Amino acid sequence: MTRPEAGAPATPRTWRKPPFIASPLLRYGLLAVLVVYLVWAFGSLPFNWARISEGLPRAGRIFGGGFPPSFERLDLLLTGFKESLQIAVLSTLLGVLLSIPFAVMAARNVAPLPVYLLGRAVIILSRSFHPVIVAILFVAAVGFGPLAGILTLTLYSIGFVGKLLAEEIEEIDWGQVEAMKATGAGYFAILVYAVFPQILPRQVGLSMYQLDSNLRASAVVGIVGAGGIGGTLMNAFGRYDYAFAFAILLVIIAVILVSEGVSGWVRKKIW
Amino acid sequence: MVDQAGALADRVWKRYDRRERLIRYAVMLVTLTVVVWAVRDIDIFWPWVWDAPNQISSLGARMWPPDPTRLAEIVNAMIETVHIATLSTMLTIFIALPVAYIAAQNTTPNRACLWLGRFILVSSRSVNTIIWALLFVAIFGPGVLAGILAIMCRSVGFIGKLMGEAIEEIDRRPVEAMQATGASKLQVIAYAVVPQVMPAFFAIVILRWDINIRESTVLGLVGAGGIGVILQGSIDTFAWTTVATILIAIVVLVLIGEAITSLLRRKVI
């Protein structure tokens, strides 16, 4: 126990909340940096205020035209969704299958260093581009339509599933691999009997997650022409048919909620 | 003795019982049916599929070597992209925190607020950033404002949902202690709730900033500002070498973003 010194003045002390950042220099420094950044950012961004001020009446017109959503062209909507679903299913299948070799390549404990670096590079590259950018490149290469969408989402799935699967392989129980090695098994026999059984449950869960994720993404890659409901939505916006556009949006939201629910339920069952 | 050996030989180890096996076959059958249907029904011109590797490598050849002449313009657009991501993440915080507060079961004032909060979170999360951007470009015209609003609208759901979960997991006791001293509602939030969710808050905001940088690179494709505008322009004019430069710039930006976020995570959390 330390007692206050006898000579100390007995002023009533009030408790103050300790500041979030202890050093005052850093505290005010960060604040100053923030202010300078905000001024710079707002000063350098080109805002077209004349056009923006027209926004509110326009929003009124868009929402006025959008309600009630029109389901008159239901067949067009259903065709778009069917295509989105097909893109999602095929790209998930391809992506999940292809992600296995890349995951093995990108796992440090089962791949030699040069192969590991190659595998990591593929995964980092396919993860750093947003699917829409990949989609626009594939549309330029192979033309409009669902093929571009499937290629895009396959690449997207390889990046995501491959990364998580590689981390899973790096964390496996090494005892089974050594047991297989002790029997004189070759490299592929070890992969099939000692590594894959350990990552399979995770892989099934990831596939379900990726199916959900691909279904969401397939709704947007269509905006740049890669097939599916996104193209229908883009057309509706382009023709100022806001009632149909809002109908599509509502259905997209509903489908995503259902798919999220189903995917979550399956994953809970498996894990 | 012989009987026993015979019985042992007859016993075959099976991993799954009858019911599990049936379920597994049924799941496989359904999967196979869906895949076959998707392959047969999808609107693809198959000769193009076999030609795709050629087309892709030809596009790759046209992109090489990257053309750095418009580098200054690209760097400016990149800075704009980062501004969009940063400003929208900052602005989102002011909307997402109140929404998280009313959408968390233990802090929500009443049931109506709880459902309002959940409705905002779900509708924000279900609509993709680029679809939000499409809507805001229609309203406010092409430009950065549409991009900032689009990213904000998508981030509110993300930050709000995760913050709501963080608030639901706090320790009740500090809250009760504060209430027992007669603290006002605002004081309870400031002294009992906020300190407990602070680490989660920084982790979530940093994560979302990283995601937003990626997302803001595509906003320009629908006219909402950033690097996407130049990318779309170069693709439309078949300036593939410029496209290659832009793609490299995007990879560099994303890697820098990841380096900054991992640094921030180590320093702050």
Image: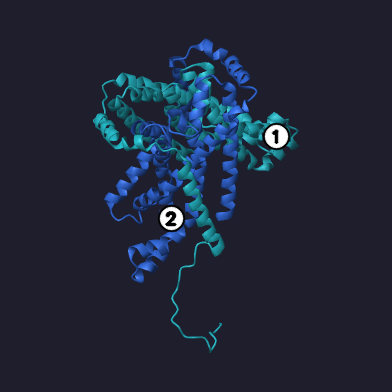
Is disc 2 in the same subunit as disc 1?
Answer: no
In-front residue for pair A213/A209: A213
Q: How many labels does the image show?
A: 2
Identify the chain of the residue marked 2, using the numbered disc in the image. Answer: B
Residue B190, horizontal then vertical, whole percent = 40, 62
Could you give the CA–CA distance between mark 2 and mark 1, rounded to whole angstroms?
40 Å
Indicate the chain coloured cyan by its letter. Answer: A
- In the rendered structure, the answer to whether residue B259 lies left or right of residue A47 reads right
Task: Give the amino acid at mark 1.
Answer: Ala
Q: Is residue B225 above or below residue A228?
A: below
Q: In this view, does A257 lie above or below A143?
A: below
Indicate the chain coloured blue by its letter. Answer: B
Residue B138, horizontal then vertical, whole percent = 35, 30
Q: Which secondary structure lies at badge 2?
A: loop
Which quarter shows the N terminus of chain B? top right
In-front residue for pair A15/B105: A15
In-front residue for pair B12/B120: B120
Say which residue appears at 33% left-offset and 19% top-offset.
A76
Residue A8, horizontal then vertical, whole percent = 52, 86
Q: In this view, does A137 lie above or below B141?
A: above
Q: Is residue B208 visible?
A: no
Say which residue appears at 59% left-offset and 26% top-offset.
B244
The image quarter containing residue A172 is top right
Please rate how many residues cluster around mark 2, counting C-alpha atoms within 10 Å: few if below 14, some from 14 to 19, many from 20: few
Q: Which secondary structure lies at badge 1?
A: loop
Q: In this view, does B234 lie above or below B206?
A: above
Say which residue appears at 33% left-offset and 63% top-offset.
B185
Residue B218, horizontal then vertical, whole percent = 48, 32
Circle 1 is placed at which residue position? Answer: A111
Please rate how many residues cluster around mark 1, counting C-alpha atoms within 10 Å: few if below 14, some from 14 to 19, many from 20: some
Identify the chain of the residue marked 1, using the numbered disc in the image. Answer: A
Circle 2 is placed at which residue position? Answer: B169
